[in-house]
Amino acid sequence: MTRTLASSPTAADPAPTRLPLLDVLRGAAILGTLLTNVWIFTSPGAEWGVLIGDTVAPSFASFPDTVGSVLRLLANGKFLALLTLLFGVGLAIQHASAARRGLPWPGRYPRRALFLLGEGVVHFVLVFAWDVLMGYAVTALLVAWLLTRSRRARNRVMWWALGVHLTLMALLTTALVAAGDQGGDTPSRAVRDLYAHGSWGEQIVFRLENALALRLEPILTFALLVFLFLLGVRLFRAGAFGQDATGRRIRTRLLRWGLGLGLPISVAASLVGSELFLLDRYVGGPLTALGYIGLTGVLLDRIGGTGPLTRGLANVGRAALSGYVLQNVLCVLVAYGFGLGLTHRLGDRWQPWWVIGLWAAVCAVLMAGASWWLRRFGHGPLESVQRWALRR
C-alpha cells in the first residue's frame, strides 16, 4: 500500500542537514567489513571454507596467530551488523525526506530496493559469494512497508524479530555443542584448486551450483536483519547521530552497553571454540556494533572531524556501495588464481602479515579513490549508475 505522508509539500522545503557521524560510520563499516572478508579471500577454501569452518577457528599458539585471531574477533559480525543498522538509518532518512515533500511512501522506493537486489545478484555471481546486498534489498522492502504502520506496530515487529533470532541462534548453538567440536574440515582438493588455479568462469559456475548453501547467511539471519533495520530507524529518530547533547548522551550509553556486553560475549565464544561461533557473530557482533557507534561518536566529539583519516572514512561512507563492491573486486584479483593468486603463492608462510597488508592497501586505495572521485562528482560511481537507471 502507498500512503501519502502528511507534510507540507512545498518546493522550498530545506534539505536535511547532513550528519557527519553517519558518513564516518558508513566508511568504518565498509572497511571493517573488509577486515572480516579479507580472511575469506586469503584462505585456501575461500568462499566455501566459511561453511566448513576453515576460516573461523581462532588460534593463540603464536604471536602471529594471536594477532590474526584478535583482528578477526574485533571484526567478525561487528561491522556487518553496523552496516546493516546504518542501512536502516538510510531508509529512515529517505522516509523523512518523502514526508517533508509530501510524497507518497513507499512510492518508488520498491524500485530502488529491487534494483539493489539485481546489483546484489550480479555481485554474488560475478564477484563474491557472501554478498550482503541481496539480503538488504529484501529486508528493505519489508521495513519500507513497516514505516507506514504505527510506531507500536513497528516496535512489536522489532522485538518479535529479535526474539525469533535469539531463539534460532540458541537452538543452532545447542545443536553444534551437542555435535561436538569436529575441528573444522579441510577444503577438498577440488575446491582448493578452483580458487588457486581455476578460471573466473569456473568460479561463477561453482557459485551458481552451490547458490543455496552460499546464500544461507541472509536466510538464517533474516530476523536479525529486520531487527537491525528497525533499530537503525529508531536510533535515527531518537537523535542518536546528532551533534547535540541528546546525541552525545545516547552514544555514551551505546558505548557502555555495547562494548560492555558485546565484547565479553565474543571473547568468551571465541575462547570456548567453534561451537559458539554463532553467538560470537550474530549475538555478540550486533551488541558490539552498538558500542562501535558510541566509541566512534565519542572520538569524533573529542578530536573533531577534520583530520585526513576522518575525511577519508567519510568519503568512503558517501560512496559506500561503490566502496563495498570495489574492495571485493580488488581482493578477488589479488587473492584468486585467475588474478595474482597470492593466496596460493604465499600460503601460510607470511600469515597474517600479508593479509593485514592487503587490507591496509585496499583501505588506502578506497579512501584515496573516494576522495578523488567526490571532488569531481556528487556521488560514487555505482551510486550514480543507480540514480541514472532509476530516473529512467
Image (cartoon, rainbow, N blue to C red):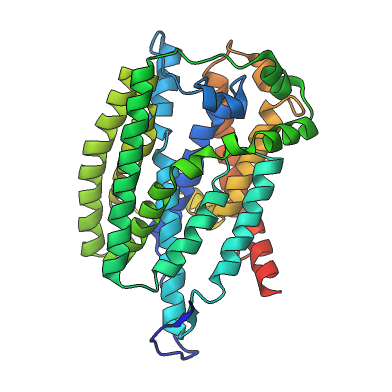
Label count reads 0
Q: Quadrant of residue 287?
A: top left
Can residue 235 be seen here? yes
Would residue 252 be found to the left or right of residue 102 on screen? left
Relative to 281, residue 84 above or below? below
The residue positioned 75% from the left and 29% from the top of the image is 339
The quadrant of the image that shows the C terminus is: bottom right
Residue 374 lies, in percent from the top left, at: 60, 59
Would residue 275 be found to the left or right of residue 339 on screen? left
Residue 191 lies, in percent from the top left, at: 67, 20
Residue 133 lies, in percent from the top left, at: 56, 50
Q: Quadrant of residue 111?
A: bottom right
The residue positioned 51% from the left and 22% from the top of the image is 55
Q: Residue furthest top?
A: 61
Would residue 88 be found to the left or right of residue 137 on screen? left
Can residue 305 be seen here? no
Would residue 168 be found to the left or right of residue 369 on screen? left
The residue positioned 42% from the left and 27% from the top of the image is 71
Identify which residue, 297 or 338, lies in the foreground: 338
The residue positioned 31% from the left and 40% from the top of the image is 167
Residue 17 lies, in percent from the top left, at: 41, 72
Identify which residue, 175 or 88, lies in the foreground: 175
Identify which residue, 216 or 277, lies in the foreground: 216
